[in-house]
Amino acid sequence: MKSREIHLTEYPKGEPGPQHFALAEADIPAPKDGEVLVRNRWLSVDPYMRGRMSGMRTYVDPFQLGAAMEGGAVGEVVESKDPALKPGDWVMSMNGWREAYVAPAKGLQKLDVSALPPQAYLGIAGLTGMTAYVGLKRMIGLKEGETLWMSAGAGAVGSAGIQFAKAMGAKVVATAGGAEKTTFCREIGADAVVDYKTTDNLAKAIREAAGGGVDAYFENVGGAHWTAALEVLKPKGRIAACGMIARYNDAGAQPLPDNLTHIVAKSLSIRGFIVIDHMDMLGEFITDLSGWMMAGKIKARETVREGIENMPGAFLGLFRGENLGKMLVKV
Amino acid sequence: MKSREIHLTEYPKGEPGPQHFALAEADIPAPKDGEVLVRNRWLSVDPYMRGRMSGMRTYVDPFQLGAAMEGGAVGEVVESKDPALKPGDWVMSMNGWREAYVAPAKGLQKLDVSALPPQAYLGIAGLTGMTAYVGLKRMIGLKEGETLWMSAGAGAVGSAGIQFAKAMGAKVVATAGGAEKTTFCREIGADAVVDYKTTDNLAKAIREAAGGGVDAYFENVGGAHWTAALEVLKPKGRIAACGMIARYNDAGAQPLPDNLTHIVAKSLSIRGFIVIDHMDMLGEFITDLSGWMMAGKIKARETVREGIENMPGAFLGLFRGENLGKMLVKV
């Protein structure tokens, strides 16, 4: 069987482009004992992948040049040499950026697709949703009645975070860029939305939207958002930082105004985190998410591209803000 | 009785100077029932007082113009109309910046001067030492065998922090400016010291001194120190931020290079704090400090000026780094 896959051809400096990727074709062998052949159906693209393209070791190893890239993927078992899985079963793996693969059955997570569509496991019910959950519950400790500023509110983590924070009883001010995204943030429950692209004073706009300061800020953006957050946080304010998408591609970063004394004067708490360090919260997450879904509090919104050849474009689109909710590629 | 005292004459913008202070004389009335007359002997000057000179409400109220300023003070009871205190007793209060005062006895803290000299209660055994302790124990959670970078190591909080961290079993890299201060840091136990004034690459110098990265950073400085700290902290590194003296006087702050993505990539934790929010740790602090003192692990070092008229100069000297250890004025 043939499978098409995407290779990284060189480690980009600054913003990556289509020239850094190549479409290749691989022969997929028949599965051996204990293995299964899987046909991927949904592939994930995520901002953190930019870090793996740097060629430097960060919290995950860099992608190898000239080999299939990796990432979240959901697919169907086609052929099985392991009694734990049978053809037609849905599985999740990190064997993304390719149409098909053979792998040991025991490294794959079998999915229950009776309650959720399979691609939800790459988004709101997967690491994306878990990231929003860990940030709100453990890093921020969001409490009922508090006010949260969710940045990148129309993105994958942001749109999950808005809905989770509302389900937790918080007031949510979201930021997003452009009319379509701000409308989307309101649709999924944000109490107030600020279009940062048309605002010349972000801190002032957040204060007005929040009716004062905010108790917590969920950092997905960096740069001017960070600066404004230090301004508008109330005393004892908390920041959860899981990504700073505006910065991933900055070979030469813009300097920031130094307003760090707010950290001391307001006793702020700032916690960066990587979701995989907090998988002990998975059970709690699934319980809460199931309850919120049954109560009709959660909408999973996706932006879908089609075809393996469009993976690089989908990934690059993340940095141009082309997604509403989770960006996925159907293959 | 006459008492000389220092008034603030206007709220300074940027760096304060002698012109913002005035020496005045007040009549001290006789104490009424429940009150005592106290002759101050030691007055504290602290960087946080700059915040109270801004005219804006931060975490404490601003100083009033044309009235005696306030701050930590240790003095002797001269006359008492309350059975709880008798002449000759030593007391601590916030009635500093003046030679004498009358106040209700129940608002004053009686000091045990049998084990410690009275002025230690303004320094290593007072809020200064407590600030170092809370930062290391609660904000950072410093563990035996970890490496701490203590900034402003020759200052009041820094010199306490170096000694406490050593007593906790950590390795300490200190930064300070100039030969006298770096020598002092070594004398009180720092394993390695970097003179930031003669270093053109602070992050590199810290890495070399630490033999790699550091587990924790105690922030007393801000600016280029902060930037270097984000560089040299190891994954899961922690920052305690209780002051940023380089910044208190900046009416127009210098921009900082944006290296905030380290917060996410290394899962850093950053906590600003004000010591008065953590007074529940006082008992634990006194227990640990007494033990360390009896084991000969702690040296209290002070820089002493004489006379109430030299209070403004002592305070202004903090921002020019004129103190080794705690800056005090004897009156």
Image (cartoon, coloured by chain):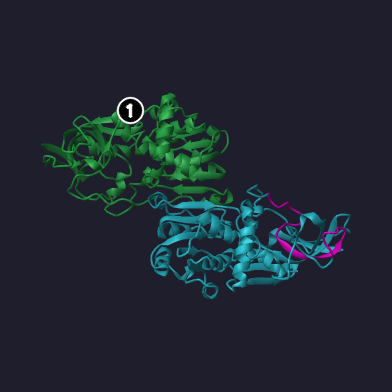
Chain colours: A green, B cyan
B3 above or below A312?
A: below
Report the chain holding disc 1: A
The quadrant in which the N terminus of chain B is found is: bottom right
B13 magenta-colored = no
Which residue matches tag 1?
Answer: A116
Closest to the observer, A84 or B69:
A84
Q: Is residue B275 left or right of residue A308?
A: right
- Number of marks: 1
Viewer-nearest residue: A230 or B279: B279
Q: Is residue A118 above or below residue B88?
A: above
Residue A285 screen position, x and y as percent: 41, 36
Q: Looking at the picture, how far across and down is residue B123, in whole percent?
A: 65, 65
Determine whether A229 is above or below B121 in the image. above
Q: Nearer the viewer, residue B163 or B181?
A: B163
Considering the image in quadrants, where does the C terminus of chain B appear?
bottom right
Query: Does B131 appear above or below A139?
Result: below
For disc 1, the neighbor class at 10 Å (few under 14, some 14 to 19, many from 20) is few
Q: Amino acid at mark 1?
A: Leu
In the foreground, B103 or B311 = B103
Q: Which residue shows up at 43% across the image and 65% down it?
A: B202
Q: Is residue A300 found left or right of A98 in the rendered image?
A: right
Residue B194 visible somewhere in the drawing: yes
Q: Is residue B79 magenta?
A: yes
Residue B163 image position (x, y, % from top left): 55, 68
Q: Quadrant of residue B80?
A: bottom right
The magenta-colored residue range is B61-86
Query: Overall secondary structure of the magenta stretch?
Result: loop
Q: Secondary structure at mark 1?
A: loop
